[in-house]
Image (spheres, helix red, strand yellow):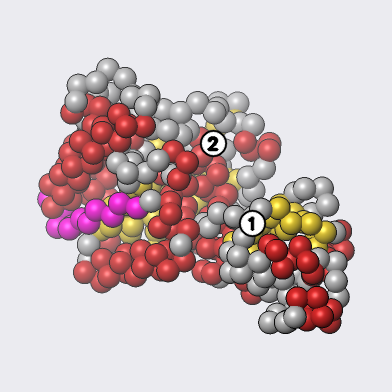
Amino acid sequence: MSGTAIRQNVLAKARRIVVKVGSNAICQSTGCPDEEAIAALAEQIAAAMASGVKVTMVASGAIGAGIGELDLNDRPKTTPRLQAAAAVGQGQLMRTFHDVFARYGVRVAQVLVTRSAFEDHQRYLNIRNTLAALEEYGALAIINENDTVAIEELRYGENDVLAAIVTNMLGAELLVLLTVVDGVLSDGQVVDVITRVDDETMSLVSAEGSKFGTGGMATKLQAADMVIRAGDAAVIANARTPNVLTRLLSGEQLGTVFAPAERKMSSKRRWIGMTASPVGSIFVDSGAAKALTELGKSLLPSGVTRVEGVFAKGDMVSVLDDQDREIARGLTNYSSVQIETIKGLKTGKIAQVIGDKPYDEVIHRNNMAVG
């Protein structure tokens, strides 16, 4: 699909979108919220909502706002100091959002989340239900990772990925990633459309982060990849371009657009494949790998060669082929101890070995995301 077709058939027709705005796009050089930049964005979001587009916002900037409020010269290096800056800055940021959006008749709601909340399926559903209720009230949800309490090992670390997860959770047709560059650049020119994020695409970007944020273009590509693999579109554009959101939603050629996959993933498979973290690994032979990736089959014990990690029935696990490449993720029907016992066996032998056969499959295809 061409960039023009995506812009006209997806962006211009999107009825539910997620807008992620980076720290540098809404903060001054001091780190303090840039009221003028936020006002420009608020006016566009209000106009989109008035036209019937359902908008959810993911906003970075709490740490940057805290740096500005505390008159710090640089971004803190230690976790406690980063958390302290976030605690100070979050209130400043939301106060600015509240006051600015109120000018356009939009009520805002702060939603602070942690990675663990998304990885637990029930809490994941609770977040989705809360966002739906806010939508019914006509309020704009402004989501941020709760940097005040999250520790490094249990956080996303960059709101681009969080925005992709929210997009997939809501089934939004479009993720808009607003930054301070015009899009993905190749030889100094903006790439119009990207159909897949691969090593060649990643080679175009720098690994360096921004002054107040934690990510860069690489994390935006990762986020876009998560969304397009699920069957929806993404776009990276410059937040400082006049009326950028309004123009994107009218189908104008701005930024870099990412083409959605032809088939949409179900909500359950989005959670399995792109949100929850595996707690163990199951390795399979070449025959099983082909059955999973090409034929859409369930994983049977006969194709399992080994197990790594300790996990229980119902846990999320990775499935790796004989080259140690991850080919799927899924919810296991058996514990790691049971799988170690029944690996390589025909289904009919399970009961003889462990005394019971509650399931034929180690992972049923309905509880698996492939690719």
Vertical arrangement, residue 327 with respect to residue 178, above or below: below
Vertical arrangement, residue 335 with respect to residue 252, above or below: below
Disc 2 residue type (three-letter): Ala
Q: Quadrant of the C terminus?
A: bottom right
Where residue 359 appears, x then y in whole percent? 70, 80
Magenta stretch contains residue 309: no
Q: CA distance from mark 1 to mark 2?
A: 32 Å
Residue 30 appears in the figure: yes
Please name the residue shown 58% across and 69% down the image.
Answer: 314
Q: Residue furthest top?
A: 73
Residue range corresponding to the magenta coloring: 103-113
Nearer-the-camera pick, 122 or 13: 122
Residue 100 appears in the figure: no
Nearer-the-camera pick, 137 or 354: 354
Magenta stretch contains residue 112: yes
Please name the residue shown 68% across and 62% down the image.
Answer: 336
Please name the residue shown 50% across and 35% down the image.
Answer: 217
Residue that label 2 marks: 218
Vertical arrangement, residue 84 with respect to residue 10, above or below: above
Q: Which mark is residue 310?
A: 1
Disc 1 residue type (three-letter): Val
Please name the residue shown 42% across and 33% down the image.
Answer: 214
Nearer-the-camera pick, 124 or 4: 124
